Amino acid sequence: MKNRLHKLTLLGLAISGLAIGASFAALDADASTTMTISNLKDITRTEYVKKATKGWTYNIDTTKATFTSWGKKTHYLKNYPNTTWVATKSAVITPAGKGSGLYYFVTNGHGDVSGWIWSGYLKAKGTAVTPSVPSSPASNSFDKVYETAKKYIGTPYVYGGTTPAGFDCSGYTQYVYKHSIKQNLARTAQAQYNSTEKVATADTQKGDLVYFGTSKNNITHVGINIGNGNMIDAQNYGVIIEKINAPWWNKVGYSRPTNLVQ
């Protein structure tokens, strides 16, 4: 009975987690609820281009910890089809009772157009994937990847997050591989799946990436296989270790970003 109750509790948490995950999206520009600003900081100048035709920039007063109105929309991405946007600041904005969103302060190349925009509307300019060639057994080991990955257990989930201030699933895998063995991964879960070598379930190793979604063309989540049927990933409850074959995940397959010494 105790095991059965434990499984039901986990399933309930999973269902509520899926509901929470649905709220992580572009924040409602017309919302009148209170928005909280956190993790405001300067970041390394990074170039982005538009990811979609939709998306507006806003003039947000970041000298205050909260605000209740987004004010007037300033610039529409659709009107800047070939613009390179330079991000110099980031902040996490959280509407009361909803999920957080990662925002960037961006400026165009001429310096005459700027504003805050949701990170999900942008993609890194010229993102490329480094060929999967390990530099040496000592530097490309699963132990190094796992050592880095474990450091961030408990880090909160932030939609669009790519830093220890908050990760989304692919931002976490990208960060772990970059800061453990200097292996570059694409930014999104779908792009990571598309750009890495696929591995059959029977041939998987520790350090392989495991993907979830409805099909190989609709990858919505990614984690790092750590063996014994477990993975470490960034999900609604933050960075955790959990079962790969949990009932709330629909596994699509595995890929190998690089050959790791086991």
Image: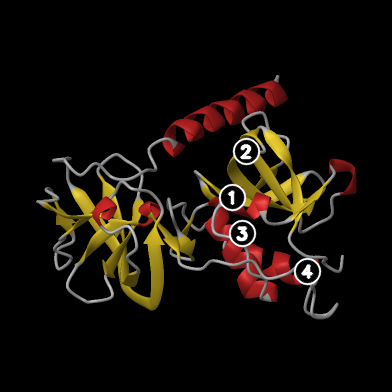
Residue marked by disc 1: 189
The amino acid marked with disc number 4 is: Asp
The residue under the point 35% across, 49% down is: 100
Q: Which of the two residues, 35 or 171, is positioned nearer the viewer here?
A: 171
Count residues near mark 3 (Cα–Cα under 10 Å), then give few for <14, some for 14-19, many for 20+: many
Tell me which label, 3 or 2, sits earlier in the chain: 3
Quadrant assignment for the N terminus:
top right
Q: From what the image shows, is residue 43 above or below residue 48?
A: below
Count residues near mark 1 (Cα–Cα under 10 Å), then give few for <14, some for 14-19, many for 20+: many
Residue 140 is labelled as none
- 229 horizontally vs 7: left or right: right
Circles 4, 1 touching at the beta carbon (< 8 Å): no
Tell me which label, 2 or 1, sits earlier in the chain: 1
> How far, Cα to Cα, is label 3 from label 2?
19 Å
Residue marked by disc 3: 173
> How far, Cα to Cα, is label 4 from label 1?
23 Å
**Residue 54, x across and y down, in percent:** 31, 46
- 31 horizontally vs 129: left or right: left
Residue marked by disc 4: 143
Circles 3, 2 touching at the beta carbon (< 8 Å): no
Colouring scheme, one of rainbow, by chain, secondary structure, one colour: secondary structure
> How far, Cα to Cα, is label 3 from label 4?
15 Å
Q: Which of the two residues, 17 or 62, is positioned nearer the viewer here?
A: 62
Q: Nearer the viewer, mark 3 or mark 2?
A: 2
Q: Nearer the viewer, mark 4 or mark 1?
A: 1
Tell me which label, 1 or 3, sits earlier in the chain: 3
Tell me which label, 4 or 1, sits earlier in the chain: 4
Residue marked by disc 2: 217
- 127 horizontally vs 210: left or right: left
> How far, Cα to Cα, is label 4 from label 2?
31 Å
- Specify the farthest residue to the front: 82
